[in-house]
Image (cartoon, grey):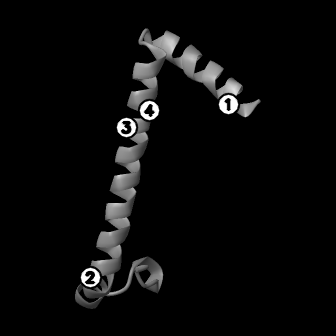
Amino acid sequence: MAADRYGEQLQRAAAEKRVAAEAYAGQVLDADLTRIRFVEGARSFISQHAAGFAERFGPGPAGRAYAA
């Protein structure tokens, strides 16, 4: 079963780091959520400001417009 396999991988990774599996799982989840929040924030910033940036500074490299 996939859940068993992931559980075993989590326990091995935690053992390598010498932390409890529950603590390691929390660290992994926190890092994933932080990354997701960063990416969502970056996408939001781009969608809000890309057009103004392109207007002020021109198109991207090789004549390509910046994606919004």
User: Crowding near pointer 2: few (<14 within 10 Å), some, many (20+)?
Assistant: few
Query: Which residue type does callout 4 highlight?
Result: Val
State the SS at label 1. Answer: helix
Residue flagged by tag 3: what amino acid is it?
Asp
Q: Are marks 3 and 1 in contact (CB under 8 Å)?
A: no
- Type of the residue with mark 2: Phe
Q: Is residue 56 left or right of residue 54?
A: left
Q: Residue at x 32, y 62 (%)?
A: 41
Q: Amino acid at mark 1?
A: Ala
Viewer-side residue, 65 vs 67: 67
Compared with residue 45, is residue 15 higher up or lower down, i.e. above or below? above
Q: Are marks 2 and 4 in contact (CB under 8 Å)?
A: no
| Residue at the spot of label 2 | 53
Q: Is residue 14 above or below residue 36?
A: above
Q: Which residue is mark 1?
A: 3
Q: Secondary structure at mark 4?
A: helix
Query: Is 47 or 61 nearer to us in this picture?
Result: 47
Q: For mark 4, what is the residue?
A: 28
**Pointer 2 or 3: first along the chain:** 3
At which x and y percent is residue 16? 50, 11
The numbered mark, 2 or 4, whose residue comes first in the sequence reads 4
Q: Give percent across and percent down for residue 1.
A: 77, 30
Label 2 residue SS? helix
Structural distance between the alpha carbons of marks 3 and 1:
20 Å
Q: Is residue 47 above or below residue 15?
A: below
* Circles 3 and 4: CB atoms closer than 8 Å: yes
Q: Earlier in the sequence, mark 4 or mark 1?
A: 1
Residue at numbered disc 3:
30
Residue 50 sits in which quadrant? bottom left
